[in-house]
Image: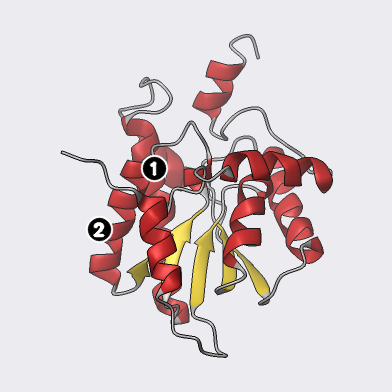
Amino acid sequence: MNRRNYQRELEQLIAGLPPEQQAPTLLLHSCCAPCSSYVLEYLSDYFRITVLYYNPNIYPEEEYRTRAAEQKHFISQLPTRYPVDFTEGRYDPGDFYACARGIEHLPEGGERCFACYRLRLSEAARTAKERGCDYFTTTLTISPLKNAEKLNEIGEELAAVCGVRWLPGDFKKKDGYRRSTELSKEYGMYRQDYCGCVYSLRERHPDA
């Protein structure tokens, strides 16, 4: 079975957008400013974007606040064809611990991460429907450490339920990840060295 090329699907979708003055609206879930950098640079040429910063997995709270502030700061600096808005979701780590209950011991990149994907994408889908957006998606696929196939699978499942179209993508492709690192340096961004949750922090820094 051939794997789907989500980046090609995105390019085909963009090519088929009607040449209207009013660009379609996109609810973009973002995990952090560095990951959003290339995605915003790319998609803001075609969509009116609202960035949703919903990441209750991030530990500790000080780290969460730092990343949220960096996200807002980057949006305020980035020149874009269409405006980019920002909205911050609820920060309640209990939401993350509830979804990770019973699978805390699993290694990074497995079922615990998939549950976290679903938690955050569910909120993105809900927010997109509430705001009447045309599409929703996430920046998470830009990371070489994230499972783009699983993210797109979850996104499509949620789209079928909420009635808002999922924007497919694999943003690491076409040098997207490389471009994100360039933009991070160009804008002097804060770059974390672990994904976000307490379990990823312990894997990255066992003695912390």
Mark 2 = which residue?
A: 157
Q: Amino acid at mark 1?
A: Ala
Q: Of marks 2 and 1, which one's residue comes earlier in the chain?
A: 1
Q: Which mark is residue 49?
A: none
In the image, farthest residue toward the bottom: 21
Q: Tell me if residue 122 can be seen.
A: no
Identify which residue is drawn at 41% across, 60% down. Answer: 10
Looking at the picture, tell me which residue is in the foreground, 132 or 42: 42
What x and y, as percent, mark residue 173? 49, 44
Q: Residues within 10 Å of mark 2 (few under 14, many from 20)?
A: some
Q: As drawn, is 5 to the left or to the right of 45?
A: left
Mark 1 = which residue?
A: 148
Q: As drawn, is 102 to the left or to the right of 128?
A: left
Q: As drawn, is 75 to the left or to the right of 148?
A: right
SS at mark 1?
helix
Q: Amino acid at mark 2?
A: Glu
For marks 2 and 1, give the CA distance.
Answer: 14 Å
Looking at the picture, tell me which residue is in the foreground, 17 or 59: 17
Q: Establish if 24 lies above or below 53.
A: below
Q: Establish if 55 lies above or below 132.
A: above
Looking at the picture, tell me which residue is in the foreground, 196 or 39: 39
Identify which residue is drawn at 34% across, 51% down. Answer: 152
